[in-house]
Image (tube, rainbow, N blue to C red):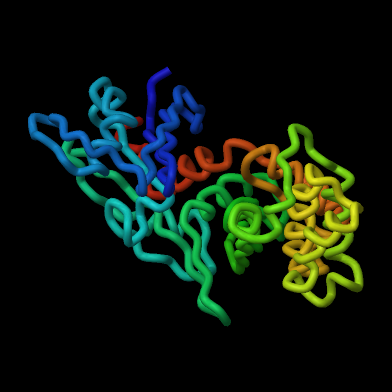
């Protein structure tokens, strides 16, 4: 099966490359630790030129051999590669956005190989406090096919996103720094002093954390309840190996309290790493959200759809 598109998910810490065939079928994929903050530094020759540019070097490592075999393959990329710190900045597009509007707004940069790399813009919302995302918009658009007119997409992570989609358009989204706050508190605060890593998920402790966030105590806010991750240990109500999962449940619970009540009666799709999504699915059930499912291959499907909207796959099909 001949490839029709190279799709790149290029973030801060990693670069994932997909060679896609007809209908977006993944023919081959790679994962490299060459995100925009970890670019190669060793010079080498690319297209007859001694190259020192980290982005060019990472791009060539990810898919140079694919382009050697098929030089005319179109290339599309999403994520932090299009940020101000990336290869070339792709300006944010304001909400509401859909596949068609983003596909027509791709930003191009020509590589040393002569290949045009088409970068997906990020999305910005400027109603109230400004909010931005890069990469998540592609994941969201990749999971919408076959869903109802209104859906809520959750993307757990360091900076969790909750994205409202109406009639295929991203209309609103919120960001919760849950994952990053958990890491900072566990590694750099007094809460981490009594914690002990566990080889198994401590479900009871996690559930307790979620319930505290939902309780009357939780109404005083996360800054009030956080200290309980220490005091429950000091009073022998939580063992050291239970405390990390309790803290996880507490933070995720407070995050979910911020979701609209109307979301309890509409479909929710989770996109992300399976273990983390499983935690969120468990917490959502405890919070009364009944219609929750998990999505896979969101990024590559979103990149394929955006490439189609931009007409990137047509020249190869007509050749």
Nearer-the-camera pick, 124 or 313: 124
Is residue 50 rendered to the left or right of residue 237? left
Q: Nearer the viewer, residue 193 or 41?
A: 193
Q: How many marks?
A: 0
Q: Who's the residue at 84% across and 54% down the image?
A: 233
Q: Quadrant of residue 213?
A: bottom right
Is 144 drawn above or below residue 160 in the view shown?
Answer: above
Q: Is residue 280 above or below residue 231?
A: above
Q: Position of residue 223 (x, y in %)?
A: 73, 72
Q: Residue at the bottom extreme?
A: 128
Residue 178 position by quadrant: bottom right
Work out whether residue 319 can be spotted: no
Q: Residue at x 82, y 68 (%)?
A: 261
**Toward the viewer: 66 or 313?**
66
- Where is residue 126 drawn, in percent x and y? 51, 77
- Residue visible at 58% across and 36% down? 297
State which quarter of the image contains the N terminus. top left
Q: Is residue 98 above or below residue 200?
A: below
Q: Quadrant of residue 102?
A: bottom left
Q: Position of residue 150 (x, y in %)?
A: 71, 60
* Image quarter in which the C terminus is found: top left
Q: Is residue 298 visible?
A: yes
Residue 274 vs residue 92, the one in the foreground: 274
In the displayed structure image, the side of residue 88 where residue 159 appears, left or right = right
């Amino acid at each position: 099966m001949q490839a029709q598109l190279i799709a790149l998910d290029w973030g801060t810490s990693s670069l994932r490359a997909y060679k896609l065939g007809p209908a977006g079928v993944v023919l081959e994929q790679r994962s490299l630790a060459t995100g925009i903050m970890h670019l190669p530094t060793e010079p080498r020759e690319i297209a007859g030129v001694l190259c020192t540019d980290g982005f060019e070097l990472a791009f060539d490592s990810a898919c140079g051999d694919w382009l050697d075999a098929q030089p005319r393959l179109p290339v599309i990329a999403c994520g932090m590669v299009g940020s101000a710190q990336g290869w070339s900045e792709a300006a944010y597009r304001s909400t509401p956005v859909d596949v068609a509007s983003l596909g027509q707004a791709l930003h191009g940069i020509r590589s040393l190989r002569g290949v045009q790399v088409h970068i997906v813009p990020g999305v910005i919302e400027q109603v109230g406090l400004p909010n931005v995302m890069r990469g998540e918009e592609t994941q969201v658009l990749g999971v919408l096919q076959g869903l109802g007119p209104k859906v809520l997409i959750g993307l757990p992570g360091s900076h969790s996103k909750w994205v409202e989609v109406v009639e295929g358009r991203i209309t609103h989204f919120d960001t919760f720094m849950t994952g990053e706050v958990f890491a900072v508190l566990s590694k750099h605060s007094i809460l981490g002093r009594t914690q002990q890593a566990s080889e198994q998920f401590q479900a009871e402790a996690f559930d307790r954390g979620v319930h505290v966030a939902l309780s009357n105590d939780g109404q005083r806010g996360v800054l009030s309840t956080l200290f309980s991750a220490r005091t429950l240990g000091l009073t022998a109500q939580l063992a050291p190996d239970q405390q990390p999962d309790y803290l996880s449940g507490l933070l995720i619970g407070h995050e979910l309290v911020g979701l609209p009540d109307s979301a309890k009666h509409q479909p929710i799709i989770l996109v992300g790493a399976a273990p983390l999504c499983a935690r969120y699915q468990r917490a959502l059930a405890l919070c009364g959200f009944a219609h929750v499912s998990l999505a896979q291959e969101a990024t590559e499907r979103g990149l394929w759809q955006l490439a189609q909207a931009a007409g990137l796959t047509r020249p190869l099909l007509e050749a």
